[in-house]
């Protein structure tokens, strides 16, 4: 699975990396522009916000600041949510053609991925909701018991409740992982089979049944490998930020202004965004690609998908794959 994913990235890096770079680059640009705007607003009011005089900072300065950064956070979440959803839809689109050995252009990937993006968002939202509901119910019950015990003045009963809470957390964690693996193929199902979110979750559970440990092991290895490579990509940028001359707080005075601080940290912030973007080009593509290969492999093992793929590949244009073999008399 891992070698197949690396091979697919090597052969189809233009649509895969191009799609991820376009989407996450756009989302990063939105974040940088919003951060510059918010930072400019803070710079003009920095003295009032950092003043040590009684009654400072005034609510008239704090509230607009909170609203500005709240809007910034919401814009960033929406931008990255859309970017991640389109990439998650684009990877199976490319994989569909890669399995058949056919080329695919950027425009075709974008068109087919955007057509399934809202179903992808719905699938991810439902999966997250399914994972969070058991945890939320457990935390609500545990908090209620703690409050009730403390209100009765029973201090000795708090310790057993803490033990029960730890045991419950140890039980809820594996259950959440089991659910995550069970529904991990749903985004791929949305693209390959044009299913809606609920149907995709059911289909994923059907395919994973009986092979949970295999899907869990391969998926865990893919995410661990992607995280490790992403961290290795970010390390050179972090080292650049620590080089002499890149970050010199001695250049500002004892009481720096907001503009000086923004100028001082601006380069490091941009460098952090760039390193995160480059690392995300791999971490956002590789795990969904491995998951898609798992989906194809499970269908070939359980549903005899091989002849269907062979028939689909045989319908391609001959000039794309060389002349047919010579006929034997």
Image: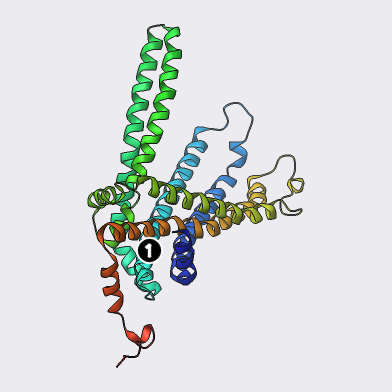
Q: Is 168 above or below relative to 65?
A: above
In the rendered view of the protein, which quadrant contains the N terminus?
A: bottom left
Q: Which residue is mark 1?
A: 90
Which residue is at a point 37% across and 37% down the rendered structure image?
176
* Residue at figure coordinates x 36%, y 40% from the top left: 178
Q: Position of residue 165 (x, y in %)?
A: 41, 22
Q: Nearer the viewer, residue 51 or 136?
A: 136
Looking at this view, is 48 or 111 the one in front?
111
- Among the 4 quarters of the image, the one containing residue 119: bottom left
Q: How many marks?
A: 1
Q: Is residue 317 above or below residue 246?
A: below
Q: Residue at x 48, y 39 (%)?
A: 66
- Horizontally, residue 46 falls left or right of residue 115, namely right
Judging from the image, what secondary structure is the residue with disc 1 in?
helix
- What percent of the width, then of the height, locates residue 74? 42, 47
Rendered location of residue 72, percent (x, y):
46, 48
The C terminus appears in which quarter of the rendering? bottom left
Question: In the figure, residue 291 lies in which quadrant?
Answer: bottom left
Q: Is residue 225 above or below residue 55?
A: below
**Nearer-the-camera pick, 241 or 157:** 157
């Amino acid at each position: 699975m891992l070698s197949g994913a690396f091979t697919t990235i090597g052969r189809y890096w233009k649509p895969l990396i191009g799609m991820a770079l376009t989407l996450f680059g756009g989302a990063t640009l939105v974040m940088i522009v919003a951060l510059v705007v918010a930072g400019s607003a803070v710079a003009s009011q920095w003295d009032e916000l950092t003043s040590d005089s009684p009654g400072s900072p005034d609510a008239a300065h704090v509230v607009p600041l909170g609203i500005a950064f709240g809007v910034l956070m919401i814009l960033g979440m929406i931008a990255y949510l859309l970017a991640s959803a389109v990439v998650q839809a684009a990877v199976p689109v490319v994989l569909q053609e890669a399995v058949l050995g056919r080329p695919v252009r950027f425009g075709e990937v974008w068109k087919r991925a955007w057509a399934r993006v809202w179903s992808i968002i719905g699938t991810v939202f439902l999966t997250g909701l399914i994972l969070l509901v058991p945890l939320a119910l457990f935390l609500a019950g545990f908090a209620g018991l703690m409050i009730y015990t403390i209100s009765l003045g029973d201090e000795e009963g708090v310790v057993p409740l803490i033990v029960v809470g730890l045991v419950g957390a140890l039980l809820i964690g594996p259950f959440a992982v089991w659910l995550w693996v069970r529904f991990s193929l749903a985004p791929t199902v949305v693209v390959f089979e044009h299913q809606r979110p609920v149907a995709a979750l059911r289909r994923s559970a059907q395919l994973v049944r009986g092979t949970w440990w295999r899907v869990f092991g391969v998926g865990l290895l893919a995410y661990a490998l992607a995280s490790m490579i992403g961290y290795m990509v970010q390390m050179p940028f972090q080292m650049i930020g620590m080089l002499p001359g890149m970050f010199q707080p001695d250049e500002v005075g004892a009481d720096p202004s907001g503009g000086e601080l923004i100028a001082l940290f601006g380069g490091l912030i941009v460098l952090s965004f760039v390193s995160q973007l480059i690392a995300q080009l791999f971490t956002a593509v590789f795990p969904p690609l491995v998951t898609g290969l798992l989906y194809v492999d499970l269908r070939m093992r359980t549903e005899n998908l091989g002849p269907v793929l062979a028939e689909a590949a045989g319908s391609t244009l001959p000039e794309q794959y060389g002349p047919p073999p010579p006929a034997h008399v």
